[in-house]
Image (cartoon, grey):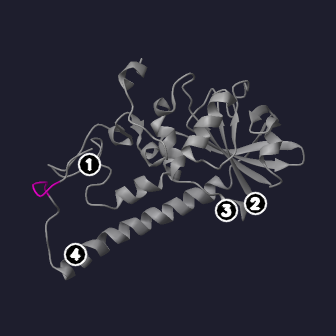
Amino acid sequence: MLSIDESTPTPPVTDRESWLRARAELLDREKAHTREGDAIAAARRRLPMTPVPDVALEGEHGSARLLDLFDGRPQLIVYKHMWHEGQPIEQQCEGCTASIWDFHDPSYLHARGVSFAVLSKGPWAELAPFRTFMGYVHPWYSNRGVDDPLLGPETEGAFVALLRRGDRAYATNWITDRGAELAMTSLRLLDMTAYGRQEEWEDSPAGWPQEPTFTGWRHAGRPVPQWSRPGATPVEAAAHHHH
């Protein structure tokens, strides 16, 4: 973890009136950014959709089909969680942890007729204890036998939006890479602080605390949120798990 102390450079100090004026100037840019985001979302709602197969999955209650994941709702969002087969809980993907850790409850999605589920190529026997340890309540399913690239293990770290009509399911949108930040509330909150995410790719003033990207997503051998879990223990010889 980066050390920030009394010697770390800070933004310049100014009086309240000057601060409010500088803040108002940035607000104009922020509002323009929000309006462009709304315009992009409007275009997103006008995208075509493409059929996807009712693939076979494995979950908490045994075998399931994609249509089961809609849980009686017209829409579904799935997150595709990366999996390192045979690796212990602490060696699982810190990026995917960041992608869904901040999103624990889909109540607001349900209120709009949208279900949420997680797909991962890990065998169910490995996914189940991981899900329990992390305290995740979202339905998880193994998609290891699926060959459709949108729904199978070929693409990981992505969100896929689906729409159901009768016994057919359609993909309406999918995002990956930095698009997945939409679920990472913690990063958005860091973005509003003086030092930002504290990663070296950011354009920050000289002397601002920064370290290599993703470094802060792990601590002492585990993805950071795992240390909040009951029973999380120090990782011994974690280096042996890195290949």
Q: Residue at x 72, y 60 (%)?
A: 110
The residues tagged by marks 3 and 2 sit, at their Cα atoms, a distance apart of 10 Å
Mark 4: amino acid? Trp
Please tell me whether mark 3 sits on a helix, a strand or a loop: helix
* Label ID, residue 68: none
Q: Are marks 1 and 4 in contact (CB under 8 Å)?
A: no
Is residue 53 positioned above or below 230 on the image? above
The residues tagged by marks 4 and 3 sit, at their Cα atoms, a distance apart of 39 Å
Q: Nearer the viewer, mark 4 or mark 3?
A: 3
* Label ID, residue 203: 1
Mark 2: amino acid? Gly
Q: Nearer the viewer, mark 4 or mark 2?
A: 2
Q: Nearer the viewer, mark 3 or mark 1?
A: 3
Q: Nearer the viewer, mark 3 or mark 2?
A: 3
Mark found first going from the N terminus, 3 or 1:
3
Q: Is residue 175 visible?
A: no
The boundaries of the magenta stretch are 5-9
Disc 1 crowd, CA 10 A, few/some/many (<14, 14-19, 20+): few
Mark found first going from the N terminus, 3 or 2:
3
Mark found first going from the N terminus, 1 or 4:
4
The residues tagged by marks 3 and 1 sit, at their Cα atoms, a distance apart of 37 Å
Mark found first going from the N terminus, 4 or 3:
4
In this view, the residue in front, 72 or 171, is 72
* Residue picked out by circle 4: 19
* Residue picked out by circle 3: 107
Mark 3: amino acid? Ser
Please tell me whether mark 4 sits on a helix, a strand or a loop: helix
The residues tagged by marks 2 and 1 sit, at their Cα atoms, a distance apart of 40 Å
In this view, the residue in front, 67 or 45, is 67
- Does the magenta stretch mainly form a helix, a strand or a loop? loop
Image coordinates of residue 234 in percent, x first then y, are 38, 35
Please tell me whether mark 1 sits on a helix, a strand or a loop: loop
